[in-house]
Image (cartoon, helix red, strand yellow):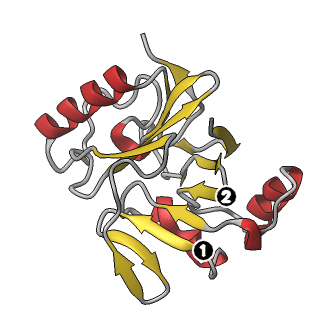
Amino acid sequence: MAEVKILIEGYTTADTAGEEKTCATITLVKDGDNKIIVDPGILESQKMLVDKLKDEGLSVGDINIVFITHSHIDHYRNIGMFPEAKTLEYFGLWDKNTVQDWKEQFSEDIRIIKTPGHSNDSLTLLVKTGEGVVAICGDVFWKKDFPEDDAYATDKEKLKESRKMVLESADWVIPGHAGMFKTK
């Protein structure tokens, strides 16, 4: 089975008055030969992520896939840290300048589903682990209970459907800007 670990827990102050600060939750997925970073985000220093990988016995060069949940810069800005990795995003699996379609059943333990609503190009990874299925869903959920009404959503009805699908498909959710939570 695959392994999932949050390397850097995200945050956002979008729900408070004042200057907005944000960082996406950055997650590592180990699935056989695949070493996947999900949403390499925005960081004050890329060294933070390099150090977290080092703690896992990995280097930037060990990462062979970067998965982007959606195309908001707070989730993908640091993608350039992984120049040798393939990029898996809504429009395909990119290997340098070559793109191919990705399969929903990406591997035996990883399934990719489209979860539109927050943005039209949102994807969720459903990862089968020893603790159950973990959904890494970007901003389908920002935090466990926030935002109830996503002011940035491109389609609130589709977002509602995507949230329902994620909750029904997973035992755990890693949202876009917080730590993992258990589904009901």
Q: Which residue is mark 1?
A: 85
Residue drawn where x is 67% and y is 58% of the image: 33
Residue drawn at x 63%, y 35% as measured from the top left? 1
Relative to 71, is 60 on the left or the right? right
Q: Closer to the N terminus: mark 1 or mark 2?
A: 2
Residue 159, placed above or below residue 120: above
Q: CA distance from mark 1 to mark 2?
A: 13 Å
In the displayed structure image, the side of residue 20 where residue 1 appears, left or right? right
Residue at 62% across / 21% down in the picture? Answer: 131
Pinpoint residue 126: horizontal percent, then vertical percent. Answer: 44, 38
Question: Is 104 left, or right, of 82 in this rendering?
Answer: left
Q: Position of residue 40 (x, y in %)?
A: 58, 61
Mark 2 closeness class: few <14, some 14–19, many ≥20 residues within 10 Å: few
SS assignment at label 2: loop
Closest to the observer, 125 or 25? 125
**Residue nearest the observer in this picture, 93 or 68:** 93
Give the quarter of the figure containing the C terminus: top left
Residue 33, which numbered label?
2
Check the image and report above or below for 170 versus 31.
above
Q: Position of residue 152 (x, y in %)?
A: 26, 48
User: Residue type at mark 1?
Assistant: Ala
Mark 2 residue type: Asp
Name the secondary structure under disc 1: loop
Residue 160: tell me if it is visible. yes
